């Protein structure tokens, strides 16, 4: 099995702290950006890519072929075949799949929300995790990982059986700042476990950048997820064997979408996420990265 | 030309200015009486639509409905039912005191039904099928470049 890279842990921790400070500054800056105390609906006159009707449910389903790799030892890839999506927006409150939120301030360019969102990493451990329903339709109730304990390798001399972590469903709560400027959309979530399972912190940040717009649209998304040591250890730590530090996982996604007839649109994307050493070095993890690809069509209702 | 000129001179010489004035007053009274008679006839004719209102939800772009227009008059009338801005739709009756007309309509704006005289010169009765759009407010959708489908 792999040793605990304490040197990496210290470096990662320092990086993460610096990152958290930067993001905190960004957040404060966001707070200084003029924003209305109440949601501003003046520039939303109808249903567009940016605007949605208040008080109505929105449903869509993606049908296609895709897969998300599973970095866990003996982890089975998560199929992306039928992907239902739903949302509901009240004047301030919203439901966005499994996320709940309240909009505190909103303008044409900036939005500040308080949100609650599921802890993400559990999707690798349980096929039945609800988030897998909204990422890829579960084929059966089986777990994403094999039921047997993790092994570095069955034939490795001196290999130690590692008990399989069994993370529970958690919810993270916190502030979310989103913005749109010159076609670029941004998202920054500062989150903390609010279910008392690990009391860890997580930061999600990303930019959505339109690249080419013709009949269809090419776009690139770049971002990262930062996880505190507590959160990393809740999912990837093994008592008395491995304790990770905080982790910074960057990702990049390239996507293409084009409207089809009626309420259909074609969608394809490929995403690559690099897992930090603090996660990849865990004995329950065998891959240093997660890839996601999907090609299909989305129907809105 | 010369004949016409001579006739005009003859007419002017016979008619005094007072006579001309009386003639004008008489003609005006006749026109007013005719219009009032037409209006009175129109008031007696009742036109009813069913349905009278179509409510569009936020998701609907247009109404699709079978509309029934029913008219009644205290005496027999000859008239035509038309829809404003839809010249292809016209249903006429000759010497009837009532009539019913049903039609399948697709519309996004108010539809005005009119009963007119057979020459389509005068409106005898009018009724509108109103389109009411549900008031929908919009707000910004959440931006989620971090999420898988965004």
Image (tube, rainbow, N blue to C red):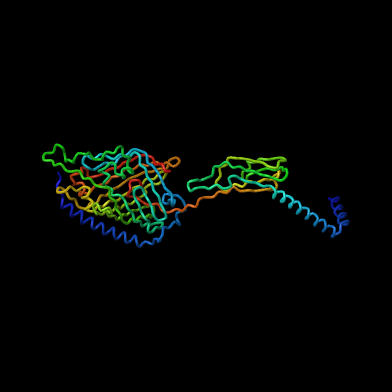
Q: Is residue A217 left or right of residue B55?
A: left
Q: Which residue is drawn at 48% across and 46% down?
A: B59
Give the tally of numbered discs. 0
Image position of A141 with respect to B54: above or below: above
Image position of A160 with respect to A100: above or below: above
Q: Pinpoint residue A184: horizontal percent, then vertical percent.
A: 36, 52
Q: Is residue A264 left or right of residue B14?
A: left
Q: Residue at x 54, y 42 (%)?
A: B64
Q: Pinpoint residue B45: horizontal percent, then vertical percent.
A: 69, 47
Q: In this view, does B142 lie to the left or right of B117?
A: left
- Which of these two is toward me, A123 or B3? A123
| The furthest residue to the left | A158
- Which of these two is toward me, A99 or A177? A99
Q: Pinpoint residue B69: horizontal percent, then vertical percent.
A: 62, 43
Q: Which residue is drawn at 22% across and 55% down?
A: A15
Q: Which residue is drawn at 29% across and 39% down?
A: A141
Quarter of the figure that contains the C terminus of chain A: top left
Quarter of the figure that contains the N terminus of chain A: top left
- Which of these two is toward me, A230 or B72? B72
């Amino acid at each position: 099995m792999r040793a605990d890279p304490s040197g990496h842990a210290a470096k990662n921790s320092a990086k993460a702290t610096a990152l958290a400070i930067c993001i905190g500054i960004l957040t404060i800056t966001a707070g200084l950006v003029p924003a209305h105390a109440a949601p501003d609906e003046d520039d939303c006159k109808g249903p567009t890519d940016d605007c949605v009707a208040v008080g109505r449910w929105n449903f869509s389903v993606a049908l296609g072929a895709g897969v998300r790799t599973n970095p866990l030892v003996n982890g089975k890839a998560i199929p992306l075949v039928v992907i239902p999506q739903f949302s509901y927006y009240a004047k301030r409150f919203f439901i966005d799949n499994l996320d709940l939120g309240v909009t505190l301030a909103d303008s044409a360019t900036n939005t500040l929300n308080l949100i609650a969102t599921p802890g993400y990493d559990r999707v690798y451990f349980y096929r039945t995790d609800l988030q897998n329903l909204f990422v890829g339709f579960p084929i059966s109730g089986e777990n994403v990982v094999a039921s047997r304990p993790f092994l570095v390798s069955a034939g490795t001399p001196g290999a130690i059986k590692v008990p399989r972590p069994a993370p529970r469903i958690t919810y993270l709560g916190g502030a979310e700042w989103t913005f749109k400027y010159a076609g670029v959309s941004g998202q920054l979530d500062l989150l903390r476990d609010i279910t008392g399972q690990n009391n860890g912190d997580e930061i999600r940040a990303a930019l959505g950048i339109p690249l080419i717009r013709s009949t269809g649209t090419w776009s690139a998304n770049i971002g990262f997820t930062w996880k505190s040591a507590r959160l990393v250890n809740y999912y990837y730590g093994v008592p008395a064997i491995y304790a990770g530090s905080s982790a910074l996982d960057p990702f990049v996604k390239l996507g293409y979408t084009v409207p089809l007839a009626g309420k259909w649109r074609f969608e394809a994307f490929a995403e690559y996420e690099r897992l930090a050493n603090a996660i990849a070095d865990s004995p329950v993890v065998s891959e240093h990265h997660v890839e996601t690809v999907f090609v299909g069509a989305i129907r809105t209702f | 030309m010369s004949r016409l000129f001579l006739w005009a001179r003859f007419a002017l010489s016979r008619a005094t200015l007072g006579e001309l004035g009386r003639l004008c007053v008489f003609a005006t009274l006749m026109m007013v009486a005719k219009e009032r008679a037409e209006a009175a006839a129109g008031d007696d004719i009742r036109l009813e639509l069913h349905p009278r209102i179509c409510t569009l939800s936020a998701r609907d772009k247009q109404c699709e409905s079978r509309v029934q227009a029913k008219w009644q008059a205290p005496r027999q009338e000859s008239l035509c039912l038309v829809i404003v801005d839809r010249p292809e739709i016209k249903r006429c009756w000759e010497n009837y005191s009532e009539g019913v007309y049903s039609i399948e309509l697709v519309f996004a704006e108010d539809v005005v039904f009119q009963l007119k005289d057979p020459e389509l010169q005068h409106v005898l009765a009018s009724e509108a099928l109103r389109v009411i759009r549900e008031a929908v407010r919009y707000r910004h959708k959440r931006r989620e470049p971090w999420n898988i489908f965004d």
